[in-house]
Amino acid sequence: MYRKRVMLFLGLLVVASMVLAACKPTPTPTEAPPAEETAPPEVAPTEAPTEAPAAPSHTGAWVDDVTFIAETDSQAAVRRVQEGLVDVYAFTNDDAELYQSVKEDPNTKVVEFFGVYNELTINPYGVEDE
């Protein structure tokens, strides 16, 4: 019984505070002080550049077309890379002899990565234009 009265009292107190907050008069706007007139700062003219800035050097490929090829045989994939038919073969390989032959080839670059995660996500549903 005591708990119900306390909750009733708190509820009435909240309602009364909301009513009093809604009934308070709005403040009257005051005029802003007049702005002081200041002269713009003197800016010295800058010299014209004597040389054109150097173009940034680009690293990497300027790709116009990307073709993905599924090759399940590591030896065939390495042969394609060595012949110049494929630019990159990015797949794990457990054949030590094949790895050594690729590493010894002066025309083929081997890059090793440990503990990397690569993903290519493709939207199978496409885009629906309205």
Image: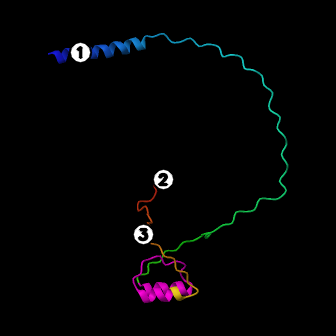
**Which of marks 3 and 2 precedes in the sequence?**
3
**Which of marks 1 and 3 precedes in the sequence?**
1
Residue 89 in the image: x percent, y percent? 49, 78
Viewer-nearest of labels 3 and 1? Answer: 3
Q: Are marks 2 and 1 in contact (CB under 8 Å)?
A: no
Where does label 2 land, which residue? 129
Q: Quadrant of residue 13?
A: top left
Circle 3: element type = loop
Where does label 1 land, which residue? 8
Circle count = 3
Judge the density around disc 1: few (<14), some (14-19), many (≥20) Cα neighbours within 10 Å. few
Give left or right: position of 18 versus 61.
left
Q: Are marks 2 and 3 in contact (CB under 8 Å)?
A: no
Q: What's the colour scheme?
A: rainbow
Judge the density around disc 3: few (<14), some (14-19), many (≥20) Cα neighbours within 10 Å. few
Q: Label 3 amino acid?
A: Gly
Q: Give the vertical position of 107 relative to 45 (above or below).
A: below
Q: Give the vertical position of 71 relative to 49 (above or below).
A: below
Judge the density around disc 2: few (<14), some (14-19), many (≥20) Cα neighbours within 10 Å. few
**Quadrant of the snapshot with the N terminus:** top left
Residue 121 in the image: x percent, y percent? 43, 63
Q: Nearer the viewer, residue 124 or 30?
A: 30
The part of the chain drawn in magenta is 73-102
Q: Label 1 amino acid?
A: Leu
For the residues marked 3 and 1, what is the alpha-carbon distance in whole angstroms? 64 Å
Residue 98 in the image: x percent, y percent? 45, 88
Where does label 3 land, which residue? 115
Q: Label 2 amino acid?
A: Asp
For the residues marked 2 and 1, what is the alpha-carbon distance in whole angstroms? 57 Å
For the residues marked 2 and 3, what is the alpha-carbon distance in whole angstroms? 40 Å
Circle 1: element type = helix
